Each structure stands twice: as C-alpha cells, then as structure tokens.
Amino acid sequence: MKTLDAALEAYYEHFGENYPLCISGNRSNEEIIADIELCIDTDTEAEQPSYEDEADY
C-alpha cells in the first residue's frame, strides 16, 4: 500500500494539480489513497470543493 504522501505525489504527477484534500477532512488516509488510485486508474480528476457565498468558512 502506498503512503498518503506517495499517493498525493502520484496524483500531482498524473494530473498536474494537487488532490483536493480539503474535502477529505473526515476520511481516513486509506480512503483518500483509494480515491486517488481510482482517480488515476480512471483518468478522472477528483471533484473540487464548492463554496457558498453566504457561508462563513
């Protein structure tokens, strides 16, 4: 199994963008790694977070 750092690096090398970790705050490292591997295998970038104008982040 890859480490999270290795998976994040592989995602960046494949897509040229960082994986959006901000949407992963409540997921385990294993779940994030699995999602990154799925993204790379299917050549589909992870969904970027959406922000609401009225929300206070």
Image (tube, rainbow, N blue to C red):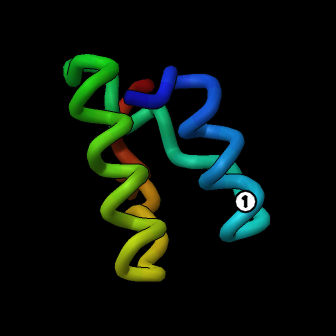
Vertical side of 42 occupied by 40: above or below:
above
Farthest residue to the front: give it: 1
Give the residue displayed 33% in from the left and 20% down from the top. Answer: 29
Vertical side of 49 occupied by 31: above or below:
above
For disc 1, the marked residue is: 17
Instruction: Describe residue 3's horizontal placement relative to residue 15 as left or right.
Output: left
| Relative depth, front residue between 57 and 20 | 20
Instruction: Describe residue 40's horizontal placement relative to residue 17 as left or right.
Output: left
Q: How busy is the neighbourhood of tag 1: few (under 14 within 10 Å), some, or many (20 plus)? A: few
Query: Considering the image in quadrants, where does the C terminus appear?
Result: top left
- Coordinates of residue 50 in the picture (x, y in percent): 38, 57
Give the residue displayed 26% in from the left and 25% down from the top. Answer: 30
- Coordinates of residue 31 in the picture (x, y in percent): 22, 32
Vertical side of 22 occupied by 5: above or below:
above
- Coordinates of residue 18 in the picture (x, y in percent): 67, 49
Give the residue displayed 48% in from the left and 71% down from the top. Answer: 45
| Relative depth, front residue between 45 and 50 | 45
Give the residue displayed 47% in from the left and 67% down from the top. Answer: 40
